[in-house]
Image (tube, grey):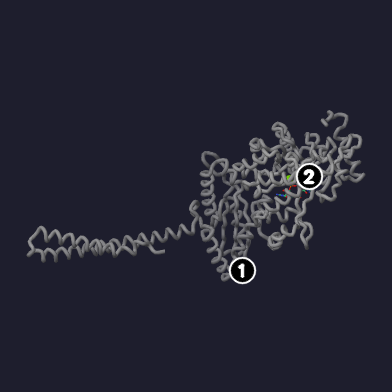
Amino acid sequence: MQDKRTAISPGIVIGCGVGAALVWLVILFVLIDLEQATLVVAGASGFFGAMGSGIGALWQTWSARHTTEYLARAEHDASHDALTGLHNRNALFQELEWSYKRAKETDTVLGVLFLDLDRFKVINDSMGHEAGDELLRIVATRLQSAVRGSDIVARFGGDEFVVVCRDLLSEKSVLAVATQILKSFAQPVSLYGGVQVVSTSIGIAIARPDDTRRPKDLVRDADAAMYKAKKERSGYAVFDEVQRMQVIDRLDIERDLVKALDEEQFVVFYQPLIDVPKKRLYGFEALVRWNHPTRGIIGPGDFLPVAEETGMMARIGEMVLREACAQAAVWNHLTADAHGIKMSVNIAEQQLIDANFPYLVSEILAWSGLPAEQLVLEIIEDVIVDHLDGLTILRDIRNLGVNLAIDDFGTGQSSLSYVKQFDMVSALKIDKSFIDEMGDGSTNRAIIEAIVAMAKALDLRVVAEGVENETQVRGLLDFGVDIMQGYLFNKPVRSDAIDPVVWFKPRGNDEGAARPGLTPLEVSRALAVQAAASGPNRPPRKG
Ligand code: C2E
Ligand code: MG
Ligand code: MG
């Protein structure tokens, strides 16, 4: 980079000198005797010449020093993060490239640690961005003091940091660095008068001297391992062979997804929701599957995250919404018993941040002919919390007459404290993880009880998902949860497996078939559950 001051300094010096000499000459000719002028001019030129070179030399020194500082500062700014002073993403990749080459030359191990702060968003949203920034600075300082001087610490973006550990003799040393970092996070942080415990999840990619990946792939792999660490709440996780296969798989999925929509490879399955005390079908949840030409049916967990990252989620979501609304409208047409049935459709974050989404919903309702009150949109808790400022979209949808439900309730960051703000939500779906372990005395029992009490106070309907056995049914009925969804009743099935005459028909109490599509054995088991749930000591239930 060229500093303008170096280019103009001689010009300025000469200009100043000549200008001042001319002024001096004019004064001489006007004011004093011409005979003495030669002497005075000679003296003055000497004086101004000396002064000119002095000023020139001073200017050069000042300019050179400031140019060096200026260049150094510009170089530093281009390679460092303004908030934390750590290396930025560009500098990280440069350093990584260099370190990777060097590790191969020196036969040493290179470790890349990818860190993501846990619950940073909650702190940022609840305490303000200044507190968030301060926290990131504190974390940066902690990281720098937890690693060795030769390691590189970079801010990768947001609340993500990357540490590159160089010149290591064994893989164990990388793990030691991760442990050290986790230890340094154990100390609570004082932040704006409050004390916060901040934790982080670390993903680790280790490159041995014979590694064949590209240096930037190490960051990608460490990032993948970080997700594992976060999911398993294990502090840190090392990228391994299983994950490597998953990455390859993921690349295949990414490639195939592009044509899957055009070739209509996505199929919608429907899982019933049962109103157990009323012994009737309450509704369905539409769940997407990918009918892959060579791999067969792929579940949403294996491709939706890729669709989200590649920006395809909104298109897939629209297709599911359209299909589910059309299907419910067809059932309405086939039997009047289907009219009260609710159709639940999952809505992804990418759909919810689109300001046009309410128009799309309204257009699909008009196109399919499905009454708005039969449609339920399920949104996972974290997505709602992350978009509290986008609640107008939810309100617009609610104003259409469509119902909103919070999905996977209890697993997110918000839970009870946030739910009060969602006055437009009409139902909560308790996550399967709570239903799984609801034996006597378990914490989950207490959580379910609290969720149900809160939901009742806020006039919200509660749905239990993932109900797999009769003990769970009994427990849930005890708590006052009436609507259940789970493999005990039915797995998700294709629409052609649903016979509207059998599934939608309301049944009298004495018929006892609480579920559609049941085998005789299942019917008798269901009856046993019903009998136990409404035994002689229990107050009669409504409905
Ligand atoms: P979800 O919305 O919580 O759906 C319930 C999931 O639990 C479904 O998994 C369902 O098959 C499964 N499930 C229900 N009962 C039981 C049970 O008794 N035992 C067990 N083990 N599982 C049960 P699925 O179909 O694999 O879907 C997983 C998640 O993928 C869904 O969780 C939802 O978050 C997402 N998803 C599925 N379809 C769509 C879609 O069209 N759009 C969006 N945005 N997300 C979708
Ligand atoms: Mg759902
Ligand atoms: Mg769910």
Left/right placement of residue 53 relative to residue 336 reads left
Rendered position, 389 above or below 158 = above
Helix, strand or loop at mark 2: helix
Dot 2 or dot 1, earlier in sequence: 1
**Mark 1: few, some, or many residues within 10 Å (few <14, many ≥20)?**
some
Disc 1 marks a residue whose amino acid type is Pro
Left/right placement of residue 365 relative to residue 122 reads right
Residue 329, which numbered label? 2
Q: Position of residue 176 (x, y in %)?
A: 61, 57
**Mark 2: few, some, or many residues within 10 Å (few <14, many ≥20)?**
many
Q: Is residue 439 visible to us here? A: no
In front of the other: 182 or 33:
33
Residue 209, which numbered label? 1
Q: Quadrant of residue 265?
A: bottom right
Q: Is residue 80 visible to us here? A: yes
Q: Position of residue 7 (x, y in %)?
A: 34, 64
Q: Quadrant of residue 42?
A: bottom left
